[in-house]
Amino acid sequence: MVQSIYDRYQIGVVLLGSEVLVEKHLKRLEHLRVRVGDVRPFFVLSKSEVSEMIPHLLSPLKLDWEAPEGLTREQLTEDVYSATNGNLSLMRHFLTQVVVHLEKQNSIVMTSQMLQHAYARLRMQ
């Protein structure tokens, strides 16, 4: 099916998965393998990269990081990293759930309970 789409519409195709699995499937599909230009591994984000991304993803919310009942950026980074293992897609889904919960609560303070709620919603998806 991928080959059919590739041939019919003359578009580029990106196959995502572990490098080993992509290579394994390409070995079985010789007719597709000859058309592949490059296979590159994608890595998960490090904890410091997650820490750098969080403010950018949450900046429109104007969160109060100094509130005594709220989480610090460091605590949020730790929780987000442990919930997603640095997976960018999961991190975005997780933070989307956090934003939804913050907006529902009309709050500018991030709490552990909000993260637990967001994590539960993430696990349900």
Image (tube, rainbow, N blue to C red):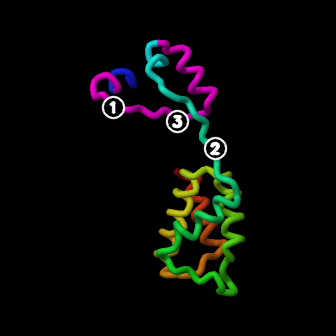
| Image spot of residue 32 (x, y percent) | 45, 18
Q: Mark 1 highlights which residue?
A: 11
Q: Which numbered dot is residue 109?
A: none
Residue 80, quarter of the rendered image: bottom right
Q: Circle 3: is it few (<14), some (14-19), or many (20+) Cα within 10 Å?
A: few
Q: Mark 3 highlights which residue?
A: 16
Q: Mark 2 highlights which residue?
A: 43
Three-letter code, disc 3: Leu
State the separation of the CA atoms marked 2 and 1.
Answer: 25 Å
First of labels 1, 3 by sequence position: 1
| Image spot of residue 85 (x, y percent) | 68, 51
| Image spot of residue 7 (x, y percent) | 32, 22
Q: Circle 2: is it few (<14), some (14-19), or many (20+) Cα within 10 Å?
A: few
Task: Residue 17: say if magenta.
Answer: yes
State the separation of the CA atoms marked 1 and 3.
Answer: 16 Å
Segment colored magenta: 6-30
First of labels 2, 3 by sequence position: 3
Are circles 1 and 3 on residues that touch, CB within 8 Å? Answer: no
Three-letter code, disc 2: Phe
Q: As drawn, is 53 to the left or to the right of 100?
A: right
Task: Residue 66: say if magenta.
Answer: no
Q: Residue at x 57, y 52 (%)?
A: 88
Q: Residue at x 52, y 29 (%)?
A: 38
Asked if residue 37 is positioned above or below residue 45 in the image, the reply reads above
The mark closer to the camera, 1 or 3, is: 1
Q: Residue at x 60, y 41 (%)?
A: 42
Closer-to-camera residue (33/84): 33
Q: Residue at x 47, y 24 (%)?
A: 36
| Secondary structure of the residue carrying numbered label 3 | loop
Q: As drawn, is 4 to the left or to the right of 19?
A: left
Three-letter code, disc 1: Ile
Asked if residue 84 is positioned above or below residue 77 in the image, the reply reads above
